[in-house]
Image (spheres, rainbow, N blue to C red):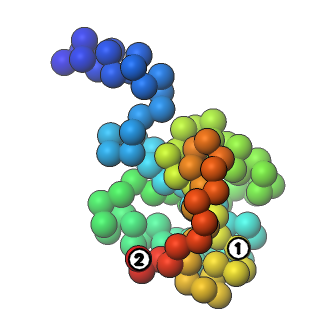
Amino acid sequence: VERMFAVLCEHWGGKWPFWISPRQIMIIPVHAEWKEFCESVRSKLHDLGFYAEVDTSKATFQKKVRTAQVDQYNLQLVVGQKEVENNSVNIRTRENKVEGEMKVDD
């Protein structure tokens, strides 16, 4: 088991695929007033079996995104006013590729 784990660590270089990643999703609110919406999204994802966290730090938005990338989260879900109004999230990958907006219920 230890050897296989070592092979996987070396093969993926710390960038674990989504299904095995210990850090799957980071939800990043653009402003503190959308924290409640972010927590509801986290709760829905958790109920579906995903590992999700909300960044409630007082860091700037750019710092939150950078921290999520450095921490190797597979996906970053960005929440701003537009997303709250549309009941959606804006999806980014750890490579900072913007995938676009998706409804929370989808």
Q: Amino acid at mark 2?
A: Asp
- Can you identify the residue that label 2 sits on? 106
Q: Residue at x 63, y 50 (%)?
A: 97
Q: Residue at x 25, y 12 (%)?
A: 3
Residue 76 falls in image quadrant: bottom right
- Percent of width and height locating residue 90: 61, 67
Q: Amino acid at mark 1?
A: Gly
Picture quarter with the C terminus: bottom left
- Percent of width and height locating residue 11: 39, 20
Q: Residue at x 75, y 70 (%)?
A: 31
Measure the alpha-carbon separation of dots 1 and 2.
18 Å
Q: Residue at x 69, y 50 (%)?
A: 65
Depth check: give the residue in front, 94 or 81. Answer: 94
Note whether 10 is above or below 78 in the view shown. Answer: above
- Can you identify the residue that label 1 sits on? 80
User: Which-is-in-front pick, marks 1 and 2?
Assistant: 2
